Amino acid sequence: MPKSKSKNTQKELFEAGIKVFAKKGYRDATVREICKKAGAGNINAVNYYFGSKEKLYREILDAIFSAYDRFDQEDWDRKTPREQLRSMISNFCAMLYKNNAFASDITSIFISEMTRPSPFIKELVDTYNRPRIKRHIKMFRNLLGEDATDDMARDCLVSVAGQLLYYSFAWPVFSRLFPDYSADERYEQWAAHVYEFSLGGIEAVRNNIFKKKENTHGN
């Protein structure tokens, strides 16, 4: 089989897998459906190119969970904590909402993993999320000041992430309440709003930490 045809078939199976997994879910999707969607006459095509349905799904999850890491992070340590926060928010918004990505099959698979995780979730978190979280926790601790704890930084991270993910999870409701709103066209404005809003919240938490420290010393 020519290499170009082989690569095209593999790509078509990968893209068909995304569509079928998004529609049916990991557990209910079948190799037969994926091959049919890809136009592959041989139902063993998935096994030939990927090894199994499970391995194809894992490759798709790798692509999803590594998406954020495709953004350039080489200069992360040279940024100030505020610049790091702006970069984190802007990159996530571009990844989630540019070109209507939030309404894509990829997002459907991601949401499915959040509600009905596959057996691969632990390894994916350890590989992709854990190193990223360590970097972000350090950033929030720097923003909050030297007396901040990891728990405080974690709560700030969750608060910011919740804003970033809102449209992905709530779009069926939000789009009916505000039909003229385009997340794709306004994702940069959304990123700017989340940044400013988050800075206000972080400053409030920072002030509370300072007040508690003063009260402790005063007593």
Image: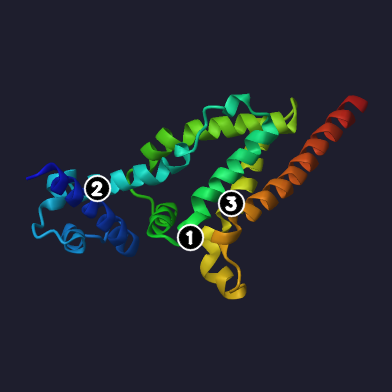
Return the residue at label 3. Answer: 164
The three-letter code of the residue at mark 1 reads Asn
Q: Is any part of residue 172 visible from this angle? A: yes
Q: Residue 141 sits in which quadrant?
A: top right
3D distance between C-alphas at marks 3 and 1 = 14 Å
> 109 left or right of 77?
left
Residue 62, compared with residue 137, is above or below; it is below
x, y (%) of residue 212? 84, 33
The disc, 3 or 2, on the residue closer to the chain's N-terminal end is: 2
> Which SS class for mark 1?
helix
3D distance between C-alphas at marks 3 and 2 = 28 Å
x, y (%) of residue 138? 62, 29
Q: Residue 176 sits in which quadrant?
A: bottom right
x, y (%) of residue 155? 65, 42
The disc, 3 or 1, on the residue closer to the chain's N-terminal end is: 1
Return the residue at label 2. Answer: 56
The three-letter code of the residue at mark 3 reads Leu
> Which SS class for mark 3?
helix
> Which SS class for mark 2?
helix
- Which labelled disc corresponds to residue 155? none
The three-letter code of the residue at mark 2 reads Leu
Crowd band around label 2 with a 10 angstrom C-alpha radius: few (<14), some (14–19), many (20+): many
Q: Quadrant of the C terminus?
A: top right
Return the residue at label 1. Answer: 100
Residue 60, compared with residue 101, is above or below; it is above
x, y (%) of residue 12? 22, 54
The disc, 2 or 1, on the residue closer to the chain's N-terminal end is: 2
> 112 left or right of 71?
left
- Observer-nearest of 89 and 160: 89
Contact flag, marks 3 and 1 (Cβ < 8 Å): no
* Count of numbered circles on the image: 3
- Observer-nearest of 33 and 149: 33
